[in-house]
Image (cartoon, rainbow, N blue to C red):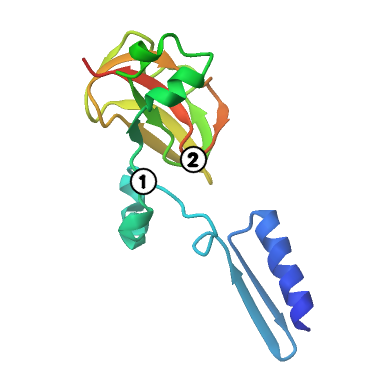
Amino acid sequence: MDIKEIQNLIKFVAKSGASEVKLEMDDIKITIKTGSEDKEPTYFQQMPMQGQMQQAMPQQQQAPAVAQEAPKAAAGDSQESAPDESSKHITVKSPIIGTLYRKPSPDKPVFVEVGDSIKVGDVLCVIEAMKLFNEIESEVSGKIVKVLVDDSSPVEFDQPLFLVDPS
């Protein structure tokens, strides 16, 4: 097996979504593991079941899930109301890539609605990533002004999810 075939095998495994593949041929043994060696870092906000994974990540890769929305971005966005009004809102952003669910299960009510008051630690939604359901908790207290995503929709890292009025 030459280096070109090994590189093609690695690409194939990465595209397939398998987390580990072992290949043994005559005098060659190859193990390919994906997930921990990604080009893009994986971000976790809070995962009680996966505490060891979170500890293993370097601090520089952890990103806050809440950021202050820039007034310039709001001014250029036609979906926002007035720039001075939305600049006081805090945007809750997705800490990971996955599928967002606004309900804990299909037969339960949504975690938060527009107008709900929230406090630090309240669960806002759940994001499924690699068959794990990650609760996204609020890092701010305030009132939900706008829900920016639909239930069961895919979300990207750092995608705005909710607008919160901290006052």
Amino acid type at image mark 1: Ala
116 shown above or below 124 = above
What crowding class fits label 2: few (fewer than 14 Cα within 10 Å), some (14-19), or many (20 or more)?
some
Q: Which of marks 2 and 1 is nearer the N terminus?
A: 1
Return the residue nearer the eye: 74 or 6: 74
Question: Is 56 on the left or on the right of 42, as rendered?
Answer: left
Amino acid type at image mark 2: Phe
Task: Name the residue: 53% across, 46% down.
Answer: 130
Q: Which residue lies furthest to the bottom in this view?
A: 27
Which of the image's four quarters has the C terminus? top left
What crowding class fits label 1: few (fewer than 14 Cα within 10 Å), some (14-19), or many (20 or more)?
some
> In this rendering, does residue 52 appear at all?
yes
Q: Marks 2 and 1: CB-CB under 8 Å?
A: yes
Return the residue nearer the eye: 141 or 24: 141
| Circle count | 2
Task: Name the residue: 41% across, 14% down.
Answer: 146
> In this rendering, does residue 103 appear at all?
no
Q: Mark 1 points at which residue?
A: 63
- In what element is the residue under mark 1? loop
Task: Name the residue: 36% across, 33% down.
Answer: 136
Q: Quadrant of residue 52?
A: bottom left
Q: Position of residue 104 (x, y in %)?
A: 42, 25
Find residue 32 and name its label.
Answer: none
Q: Position of residue 145 (x, y in %)?
A: 36, 12
Task: Name the residue: 44% across, 20% down.
Answer: 74
Find residue 157 and name its label.
Answer: 2
Q: Position of residue 49 (x, y in %)?
A: 34, 48
